[in-house]
Image (cartoon, rainbow, N blue to C red):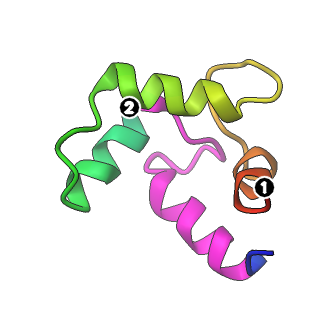
Amino acid sequence: MADIEAARTAFERYDLDKDGYISASEYKSVMAQLGDPFVTESVAEAIIKSADGNQDGKLSFDEFWAIQNR
């Protein structure tokens, strides 16, 4: 099981606009900053969609936390 405080810190790093959600464009941007140029917009969208429980096109912290505990 993941550490919730570490997960919160990671979530906040991805939530660039601080709206409480991670969008595909935010995910792509942070992955590029971390040195992964292979995460395209379509890849980011697929990753978000795979964990987006309510299908709103973005990840809430609860959805992000669920990924950490799969």
Magenta segment? 5-24
Is 10 rendered above or below residue 64? Answer: below
Q: Classify residue 42 as left or right of residue 64.
A: left
Q: Earlier in the sequence, mark 1 or mark 2?
A: 2
In terms of depth relative to the viewer, which is nearer, 17 or 12?
12
Q: Is residue 26 magenta?
A: no
Per the rendering, the mark at residue 47 is: none
Residue placed under numbered mark 2 in the picture: 25
| x 33%, y 52%: residue | 30
Which residue of the protein is positioned furthest toward the front in this rendering? 70
| x 81%, y 29%: residue | 53
Secondary element under disc 1, as helix, strand or loop, is loop
Residue placed under numbered mark 1 in the picture: 70
Q: Is residue 18 magenta?
A: yes
Residues at marks 1 and 2, CA–CA distance in whole angstroms = 24 Å
Rendered-image quadrant of the C terminus? bottom right
